[in-house]
Image (cartoon, rainbow, N blue to C red):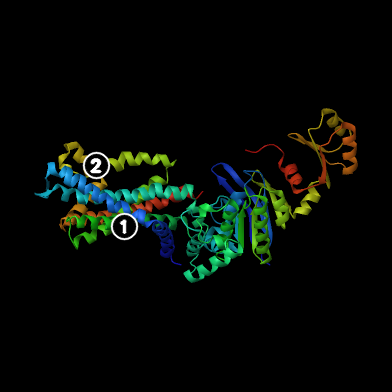
Amino acid sequence: MSAFSRVLCVWRRNLDVYMVTWKVNFLPPLLEPMFYLLAFGAGLGGFVKVVPYSGGEVSYTAFIAPGMVGISIMFQSFFECTYGSYIRMYYQKTFDAIIATPLSIEEVITGELLWGGTKAFISVAIMSLVVRAFGYMKFPDLLALPFLAFVCGLFFAGVGMCYTSIAPSIDSFNYPIFLFITPMSLFGGTYFPIEGLPGWAQKVAIFMPLTHVTEMTRAIAFGRWDAALAIRAVVFVAAALLAVRAAVLLMRRRLVV
Amino acid sequence: MAPAITATDLTKKYGDAVAVDAVSFEVREGECFGFLGPNGAGKTTTMKMIYGFSPVTSGSLHVLGLDIRTRARDVKALTGICPQEDNLDPDFTVRKNLVVYCRYFGIAPAEAAKRADELLDFVALREKSDAPVMSLSGGMKRRLVLARALLNRPRMLILDEPTTGLDPQARHVLWEKVRDLKRQGVTILLTTHYMEEATQLCDRLVIMDKAKILVCGPPQELIAKHSKPTVVEVWNPPPEAVEWIKARNLECEKVADKLFVSPEAGDAFQRELEGRFKLDQVIVRRGTLEDVFLRLTGRDLRE
């Protein structure tokens, strides 16, 4: 067996678990965009109407749809490799069971991270179709979204796993979630352009990874295939690889004693 | 035959704490070898080093002819492990647990299905194939863990406290399976807190305490060497009985509310004791591995 096929075994295990309850698992990415598009689009959109974007104006609903996709990428992958991985590591002892076979802990963690990225892929794939059904975004551009979700998901999965490697208890995940994840989901150019923030807050927002993820999802949603998108994509590929590497090393430090 | 395991000055340190202190032992191919000792003696740590889970601090350790430091992956491919804590996949059915586990060994799906069914028969869980793992009893779960450890047809099986928490029936079923495997030539490593289990299953064993090996040998030999042939247990002995026993220069030891005495003739001693002090809770029995264990590791409580 090659190292890649060993990593894939771990990924397959998680996919199999996911598919046992696929009906329940497909529900959030199916319903969430419907609720948001209705609440924010039809509800709030009636007051806001248009939002400035890229030198022009777009409808509020069209603006938040890709923002919602960005949030989903972050949530799916970050939660998978924090709560999900922690439960498998600590409560279910799944990692122990797997490393009693020829697999190494590095391969187990890499498989977990790939799965974190995949969760973002699946979620965004379903979500994009729902958004399309509401008449926003278009083919074939939106086909790129799940792949973008995988790369950015891998990044957030890696960051989450780094925290998992030092998490003293399952409750401690509240720290990164309320200090980073929740603020990013609100201020990362998701529900309104960051230009709407006061100057100092804009400077903070620029350093949030999610700001750049939503820039990318929005660029794809509006079919703006420009250099900024390419640069951001390349940076995220590099950041994802770096996060994976760091997560593997840190988890090794936690688990191999 | 080449030994299954050779450990020389095997040491494991966690920071300054020494968990295993320069132990040396040899496990022969095809034997059942036991690790006994109080909690924290270093048994599980030794096991973890043997299956490549925990890096060796110093000393050498060869498992199935392979250096564990460099060939852990190959050792794990040849070994089956039943861990102390149940780590079955709660999200899968009984059979799916086995099929998924086969993948980690690179066993092809058709072969995996065959082995899963074979082993479900072996551990008498065939009719539970489609049951969720959560619905199994403790004994069934242990049997499933055993089946899972056998999927790769291991040359060596590691059982870390395999029967802790099981009822007597379930324990006997598991012992029977272990003997079956031994007959098939599988080398078995066992840690346990049950002296009866060790006596029944082990060809040889070590008793560990405070990170060191105290003794090594076949159970009966250890009993003959470190215990008396006859032991009399006296429950709640009155002080005058204790005085009387001590006056007779008999070896005796008090543990909680029990007094252990080793007289030459157990029955005569029992009659005399019962007659003199109107005691009715006096038991005469043969020396056991438990006596050896307690004598060597002390009778104080370990926590």
For the residue marked with disc 2, what is the amino acid?
Answer: Leu
Residue B226 percent location from the top left of the image:
79, 47
Can I make out residue A202 in this image? Answer: yes
Q: Could you say whether the residue bearing mark 2 is in a helix, strand or loop? A: helix
Q: Are marks 2 and 1 in contact (CB under 8 Å)?
A: no
The circle drawn on residue A122 is 1
As drawn, the residue found furthest toward the front would be B127
Query: Between residues A90 and B60, which one lies in front from this camera angle?
Result: A90
As drawn, the residue found furthest toward the top would be B239
For the residue marked with disc 1, what is the amino acid?
Answer: Ile
- Measured along the vertical axis of the image, is residue B202 above or below residue A188? below
Query: Between residues A223 and A61, which one lies in front from this camera angle?
Result: A61
Q: Could you say whether the residue bearing mark 1 is in a helix, strand or loop? A: helix
Residue tagged 2: A186
Query: Between residues A140 and B278, which one lies in front from this camera angle?
Result: B278
Mark 2 and mark 1 lie on one chain; the one further toward the N terminus is: 1
Residue B159 percent location from the top left of the image:
61, 55
Residue B84 percent location from the top left of the image:
58, 50
The chain letter under disc 1 is A
Give left or right: position of B27 versus B291.
left
Nearer to us of marks 2 and 1 is 1
- Measured along the vertical axis of the image, is residue B209 above or below residue B47? above
